[in-house]
Amino acid sequence: MDRIKQSGQQFIDLRGVRKGFWAGGTETTVLKDIDLAVSAGEYVAIVGKSGSGKSTLLNMITGIDHPSEGSVRFGSIDVQRLDESSLAAWRGKNIGIVFQFFQLIPTITVRENILLAMDFVGKIPRHERNGRAEALLSMTGIAAHADKLPSSLSGGEQQRVAIARALANDPPLLVADEPTGNLDSATAEAIQQLFADLVKEGKTVLVVTHEDVDNAGYRRIITMRDGTIIGDAARN
């Protein structure tokens, strides 16, 4: 499956995206006519109150869920046209996802969590995987914890492991859902700086957050309310 092309042009393109969920014979619409384009190399925060549709929008972008109407494209890839097997393979190579509650495998070590991500996808040559895992652990500042179980780490350290795992297959796009919501302010600032550094290295980073974004280094702020985008502001 083709890798997303990163050349500074349009990278993510959502057009007329609507998402509804059915329950008890009634449909609740959580996204309404979303048009959104993101260029390669952007550092974007998606903000809004709980229930505004932020996480659902992230699920559309990552292909975790599909729109009821509209299209989601990554370069030449029409995401909703991929079957589940192709979608999983494509996502594994192209998108790194950082979850709010880490979702690390508790019974294996930090290093093994990262190696397993590479084993599943098969993008990184086998002889390079150990070295890449070590490099990612060093980059995220947790090399000393490589042989520990996740449960022995603090919340901030586990989030760093989750970021290292999300980067295991060198994806061009990193998305994070409330990555600092359960962290103290100093640790949150360190994670935000790590994301900013990744953007400088050429990654595209999208972060869903309810935290204060004024001093977090985001270059673009997308504001949502009631399933719609009500603001889209670039920042210097």
Image (tube, rainbow, N blue to C red):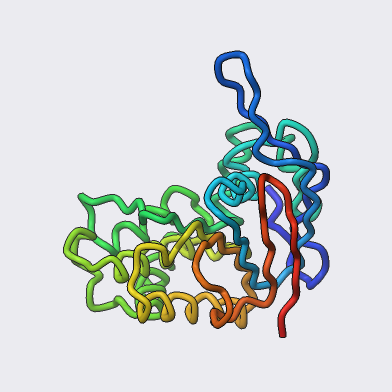
Instruction: Name the spot of residue 190 as percent of width and height, x first.
Output: 41, 80
Relative vertical location of residue 198 with respect to residue 89 in this rendering, above or below: below
Instruction: Name the spot of residue 133 as percent of width and height, x first.
Output: 38, 69
**Res. 188 in view:** yes
What residue is shown at x 48% (from left), y 78% (from top)?
Answer: 194
Instruction: Name the spot of residue 117 as percent of width and height, x first.
Output: 42, 54
What residue is shown at x 56% (from left), y 45% (from top)?
Answer: 51
Relative vertical location of residue 125 with respect to residue 35 in this rendering, above or below: below
Number of on-image labels: 0
**Res. 82 in view:** no
Instruction: Name the spot of residue 212 as percent of width and height, x first.
Output: 52, 72
Describe residue 9's horizontal placement relative to residue 216 as left or right: right
Quadrant in the picture for the C terminus: bottom right
Describe residue 70's horizontal placement relative to residue 175 as left or right: right
What residue is shown at x 62% (from left), y 76% (from top)?
Answer: 218
What residue is shown at x 66% (from left), y 46% (from top)?
Answer: 226
Q: Quadrant of residue 151?
A: bottom left
Decide which of 160, 164 is in the foreground and name it.
Answer: 160
Relative vertical location of residue 171 with respect to residue 134 in this rendering, above or below: above
Decide which of 15, 113 is in the foreground and name it.
Answer: 15
Describe residue 29's horizontal placement relative to residue 196 as left or right: right
Decide which of 217, 113 is in the foreground and name it.
Answer: 217
Q: Residue furthest top?
A: 25
Decide which of 185, 100 is in the foreground and name it.
Answer: 185
